[in-house]
Amino acid sequence: MTARVYRKTMKIGLCGFGVVGQGVWKHLNQRRRELDKRLGVSLEIARIAVRDPAKERKLPLPRKLVTTDPFSIAVDPEIPIVCELMGGTDVAREITLTALRAGKIVVTANKALLSEFGPEIFEAARTGGGHILFEASVGGGIPIIKALREGLVANRFRLIYGILNGTCNYILTRMENEDLNYTDVLADAKRLGYAEADESLDVDGWDSAHKASILAFLAHGTWVRLEDIGVDGIRRISPSDFAFARSFGLRIKLLSVIARNFESNDLSVSVRPMLLPERLVLANVNEVYNGICVAGDVVGTTLYIGRGAGQDATASAVIGDLADAALVLLGGKSPLLPDDAPSIVSGEEDRLRITLPENQESRFYLRLTVKDASGVLARVSASMASNRVSIASVLQSESDLPDCASLILTTHRTNEKAIQDTANDLKAMSVVVEDPVLLQIAEFED
Ligand code: NAP
Ligand code: HSE
């Protein structure tokens, strides 16, 4: 049987041949026949940009396609689809804007770029007649962008929360199961291709914040600036926190929370390690997996779980976008997007207000390393009382530091600002020898 020859070939310029770029190359080539058949058009990687062609790679670079100039791809009239998989926000931004202004379709996995320059990029797409597709930017292989953009378009979203960083979930899972420190596990996350080139983006919570701002844009039509997101990472979590959490029937997860109050028209976005009751599905989403819970007012709660990082999962999302790009070029529908006119205004009641979640009430877990001396517990509880924080339980155990003890306290429901003030007061006390570790005990239902 002779292979069917497709009338049209759509050329793709691949900017980046690292973890994700190589995955796209590999899987696109493996699935070429099926994809061509389904799309009725042939997707062809016509050029590949890298920084250093001599670099050793797992997959050999197809030499005749290589350039070190990604701009030559962005401006090439023969290449309608530019796949930006370089990372960073300097050259990647220029390439993306150049391609969009030339009316091209840009497929990107770059959440930092979208989060920091979203308004400029979407404006360039609108004015230049291009399109931006970004399924791989959030949730790895989970099609969460498509779900929010298309499948759930009938809904308003009171709450979206979840595990958005595969590296941190991998680290937390192995720390919990194998009693390891986070630095021991981080090296493995890097080797497996999960971590960002700058791993602090992962472990300090910024990668999750980038992704949360993209989800907030899709759900609420506004770009929340990074400085308006309460961000905390996982560096301070120690093996002892897992042991204590377990004794309370809780698990530690780095959670991103996007909460909208439709009465007051407030929107808050936060990223921080939280304690989750172990009966919840998300508490059992482990390793590199992400889990996202979306509460829509029409559909109810929907939950999405899948690999959140790594070559194959990410390539799956990118190739999905490449297929959509081909369909757009064939005259199909362009991607649905919210009206993203800037609407971040304080004090205007009819406009969406971005707030920090400090007025919310919750229970908290507080771990203190204190001098093991008489009267210390009394001083700690006096500080909590003066901030009107009510203690639910106290546990004292040995500390690794000489002449010190660990104090683990849980609180009754309390205002977030009150517990933050308490933590700051405690931090200033001479008997408290390390910065307190403060974790919210989540009260989600699903
Ligand atoms: P990576 O392994 O570091 O690969 C980056 C690639 O871009 C390399 O091939 C590099 O060339 C090339 N590159 C960088 N700057 C360039 C420049 N100025 N000109 C030409 N080429 C340049 O990164 P990655 O893990 O594939 O991630 C790529 C993007 O996907 C990032 O935005 C990341 O946040 C996102 N992402 C990654 C994952 C994941 O699991 N890894 C998942 C979702 C999204 P050389 O090879 O010559 O250095
Ligand atoms: N470094 C990111 C993570 C890659 O670990 O989730 C996927 O976006």
Image: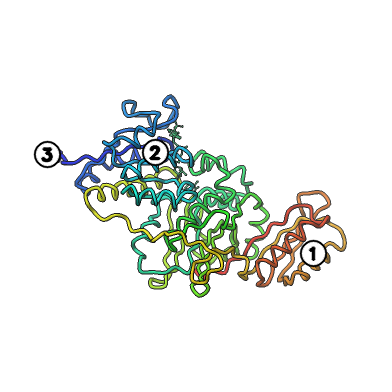
> Is label 3 in contact with label 2 (beta carbons under 8 Å)?
no
Residue identifier under label 1: 380
Amino acid type indicated by mark 2: Gly
Q: Position of residue 144 (x, y in %)?
A: 40, 57
Amino acid type indicated by mark 1: Val
Q: Mark 1 CB in 8 Å range of ligand 2?
A: no
**Which residue shows up at 68% across the image and 72% down it?**
412
Choose top left, top right, bottom left or bottom right for residue 70: top left
Ligand 1's image quarter is top left
Residue identifier under label 2: 21
Instruction: Give the SS element for disc 3.
Output: loop
Q: Mark 2 CB in 8 Å range of ligand 1?
A: yes
**Which of pointers 3 and 2 indicates the residue nearer the eye?**
2
**Which residue shows up at 68% across the image and 54% down it?**
240
Q: Which mark is residue 1?
A: 3
Q: Earlier in the sequence, mark 2 or mark 1?
A: 2
Instruction: Give the SS element for disc 1.
Output: helix
Compared with 262, 42 (above or below) is above
> Is label 2 in contact with label 1 (beta carbons under 8 Å)?
no
The front one of 172 and 11 is 11
369 horizontally vs 129: left or right = right
Q: How is the image coloured?
A: rainbow
**Which residue shows up at 40% across the image and 43% down it?**
97
Distance between mark 3 and mark 2 Cα atoms? 33 Å
Label 3 environment density (alpha carbons within 10 Å; few <14, some 14–19, many ≥20):
few
Q: Position of residue 127 (x, y in %)?
A: 34, 50
